[in-house]
Image (cartoon, grey):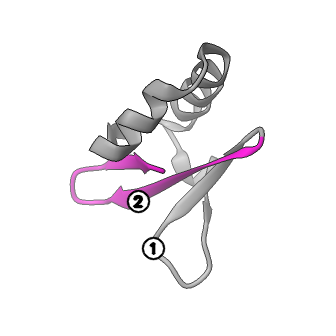
């Protein structure tokens, strides 16, 4: 299982979202915790991955040594 760590900026932006969208994003991240590579797609030419939640794109960077990823806006 992977840990999810929010960057400071992502945490600020996440708090501004309405509760329904927060729930949808939280559920998508919770579902991806065990096998994030099943849900996240790699962006071309970057070490960043994305998952779509409605009209939003959640970006993540995987830190393999610590088996965690962070969410960024």
Q: With respect to residue 71, does 50 lie above or below?
A: below
Q: With respect to residue 5, does 20 lie above or below?
A: above
Nearer to the camera, 24 or 10: 10
User: What residue is rendered at 60% in x and 72% in y?
Assistant: 43
Q: Position of residue 35 (x, y in %)?
A: 53, 44
User: What residue is rendered at 65% in x and 24% in y?
Assistant: 21
Residue 55, image quadrant = top right
* In-image side of 9 versus 49 (left or right): left
* In-image side of 17 versus 13 (left or right): right
Nearer to the camera, 62 or 34: 62
Task: Based on the picture, tell me whether residue 37 belongs to the magenta stretch.
Answer: no
Q: Which residue has dot 2 on it?
A: 61
Residue 28, image quadrant = top right
Q: Position of residue 40 (x, y in %)?
A: 61, 53
The span shown in magenta is 55-73
Residue 1 seen from this side: no
Q: Which residue has dot 1 on it?
A: 47
* In-image side of 8 versus 32 (left or right): left
> SS class of the residue under badge 1?
loop
User: What residue is rendered at 37% in x and 34% in y?
Assistant: 12
> SS class of the residue under badge 2?
strand
């Amino acid at each position: 299982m992977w840990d999810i760590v929010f960057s400071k900026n992502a945490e600020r932006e996440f708090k501004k979202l309405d509760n329904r969208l927060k729930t949808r994003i939280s559920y998508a991240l919770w579902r991806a915790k065990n096998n994030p590579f099943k849900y996240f797609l790699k962006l071309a030419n970057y070490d960043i991955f994305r998952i779509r939640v409605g009209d939003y794109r959640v970006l993540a960077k995987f830190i393999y040594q610590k088996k965690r990823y962070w969410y960024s806006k």
